[in-house]
Image (cartoon, rainbow, N blue to C red):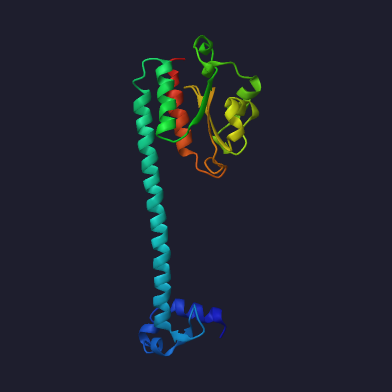
């Protein structure tokens, strides 16, 4: 018989080892971590232990991810509570920068907003941007994360740009889904924002800021 036929026979006859229980004590197979032979029952125990260890590792990883997500969710909640009571756009921007710096540990953050009417508001956040930059922001379906930002976006960080190694850029959209601005975050750590990272919370941050800005635009 071929090995595949033996496997198929045992799969089709699950009661085989109940009928021939003594075989479990008589069959010896190689030890997975050594040259000696062990009974099949002992091999099954080793397999179960390995599976249990693997599942414990996955469970620990899931718990860690859950705790990290809970922590980020709490930070997003605190940011929302800080933005909502702001009496004017400057108070809202101060709350945004403060929470990004103190709660999210993002010391480098810049914002640009460009809808009609934004020019009457004071601050670098409402300075003109190029048409090319607007098209770039409009093209982003998801937040951009990576080591190299758009050259115009990088210039927003001024003299600190030489030390920055990773960026995250979020398009801001109004209720009609039109792009009205961009929030850019940066870090000296090249692993802080990387292309393969999840962007769910960055996207939510952009949506939250868009809703907060909508009151003043």
**Residue 20: x %, y % from top left:** 38, 88
Q: Does residue 60 sit above or below 138 in this rendering?
A: below
Direction from residue 172 to residue 135 in the image, left or right: right
Quarter occupied by residue 12: bottom left
Query: At 44% from the left edge and 21% from the top edge, which residue is drawn?
Result: 93
Image location of residue 29, percent across then percent down: 48, 84
**Residue 144 visible (yes or no):** yes
Q: Is residue 45 above or below residue 138?
A: below
75 with respect to 159 (left or right)? left
Residue 171 percent location from the top left of the image: 53, 28
Q: Residue at x 36, y 25 (%)?
A: 82
Task: Pick the residue in front: 40 or 49.
Answer: 49
Q: Position of residue 111 (x, y in %)?
A: 52, 24
- Tell me where residue 204 sits by quadrant: top left
Name the residue rendered at 55%, 78% in the picture.
4
Q: Is residue 6 above or below residue 114?
A: below
Q: Which quadrant would the N terminus be assigned to in this image?
A: bottom right
**Picture quarter containing residue 71?**
top left
């Amino acid at each position: 018989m071929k090995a595949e036929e033996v496997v198929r026979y045992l799969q089709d006859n699950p009661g085989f080892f109940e009928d021939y229980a003594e075989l479990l004590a008589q069959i010896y197979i190689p030890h997975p971590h050594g040259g000696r032979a062990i009974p099949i029952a002992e091999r099954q125990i080793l397999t179960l232990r390995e599976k249990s260890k693997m599942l414990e590792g996955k469970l620990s990883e899931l718990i860690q991810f859950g705790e990290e997500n809970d922590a980020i969710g709490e930070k997003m909640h605190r940011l929302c509570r800080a933005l909502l009571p702001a009496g004017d756009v400057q108070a809202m921007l101060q709350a945004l920068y403060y929470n990004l710096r103190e709660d999210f540990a993002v010391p480098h953050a810049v914002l640009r907003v460009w809808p009609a009417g934004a020019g009457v508001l004071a601050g670098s956040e409402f300075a003109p941007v190029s048409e090319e930059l607007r098209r770039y922001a409009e093209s982003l379906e998801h937040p951009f994360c990576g080591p190299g930002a758009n050259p115009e976006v990088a210039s927003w960080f001024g003299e600190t740009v030489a030390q920055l190694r990773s960026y995250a850029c979020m398009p801001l959209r109004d209720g009609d889904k039109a792009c009205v601005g961009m929030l850019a975050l940066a870090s000296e750590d090249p692993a802080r924002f990387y292309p393969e990272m999840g962007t769910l919370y960055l996207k939510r941050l952009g949506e939250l800021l868009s809703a907060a800005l909508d009151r003043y635009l």
